[in-house]
Amino acid sequence: ESFAADLSHELKNPVAAIRAAAEVLDEGALAEPEEAARFVKRIREATGRIEALLEELLSLARIESRGVEGGEEFDVVHVARTIADSYAARGSIEIEAKVDEVRVRGGRRWISRAIDNLVKNAVVHGTGRKPVRVVVDTGETSVSVSVINDGSIAPHIRKRLFRRFVTSRGERGGTGLGLAIVRAVAEAHSGSVEVMERDSEVEFRLVLPKGSLQ
């Protein structure tokens, strides 16, 4: 019931925007090219938000219901470096690997998705005054990937960050499902994810078990 209520709430605004724009077009705006273009743009933006929301929901439902199907051992340092490099054009990204290689076992695509979501979150919410840092470290039985950005977390969402549809950037296209997917991926791999704040920094830490070949 809670999920249905949340989904209904999230869909209400883009659906209402599409309906309102269509009504204005139907009432005569089609005859005015500039006005028509403005309302068509609104329809496209709202449609894009619905598509993004449904795509993220399907991903979340898939990992929560099926878990990780199959799996392989792979180097998470290489994955983290590749993701960090892909964001270099959007801002300063630094990666610090305490080891040259460390392997985890699981769904490479899912773990890559989780790390990517954390980096994207840091790039969007960071102040930009300091580089986003990606730190890969290892313990006896686990591997941690930390993503650290300069900034803070709004108190009203601090305790709800990993729940569905919690976002502070809905007006910019955020679905509020990125961190929920990170949590689901961590749990599906018998791992965890946590968030810490200190000295105007926010750190998200994804912890995963080491692969059996370590």
Image: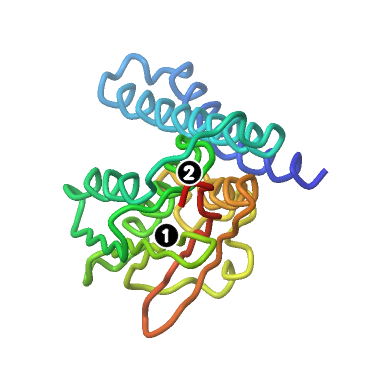
Q: Secondary structure at mark 2?
A: helix
Above or below for 181 versus 125: above
Q: Position of residue 136 (x, y in %)?
A: 36, 61
Q: How is the image coloured?
A: rainbow
**Nearest to the observer: residue 113 or residue 4:** 113
Query: What amino acid is found at the position of numbered circle 2 in the picture?
Result: Ile
Query: What amino acid is found at the position of numbered circle 1 in the picture?
Result: Val
Above or below for 204 versus 28: below
Label for residue 49? none
| Quarter where residue 91 is shown | bottom left
**Nearest to the observer: residue 88 or residue 161:** 88
Label for residue 145? 1
Q: Mark 2 or mark 1, which is nearer the start of the sequence?
A: 2
**Residue 196 left/right relative to 151:** right
Q: Are marks 1 and 2 in contact (CB under 8 Å)?
A: no
Q: Residue at x 48, y 43 (%)?
A: 111
The 10 Å Cα crowd at callout 1, few under 14, some 14 to 19, many 20 or more, is many
Above or below for 2 versus 18: below
Q: Which residue of the protein is positioned furthest toward the right in this rendering?
A: 1
Q: Secondary structure at mark 1?
A: strand
Q: CA distance from mark 1 to mark 2?
A: 10 Å
Q: Position of residue 74 (x, y in %)?
A: 41, 41
**Residue 203 left/right relative to 180:** left
Label for residue 111? 2
Q: Residue at x 48, y 49 (%)?
A: 170
**Residue 65 left/right relative to 90:** right
Above or below for 120 versus 154: above
Q: Position of residue 181 (x, y in %)?
A: 56, 45
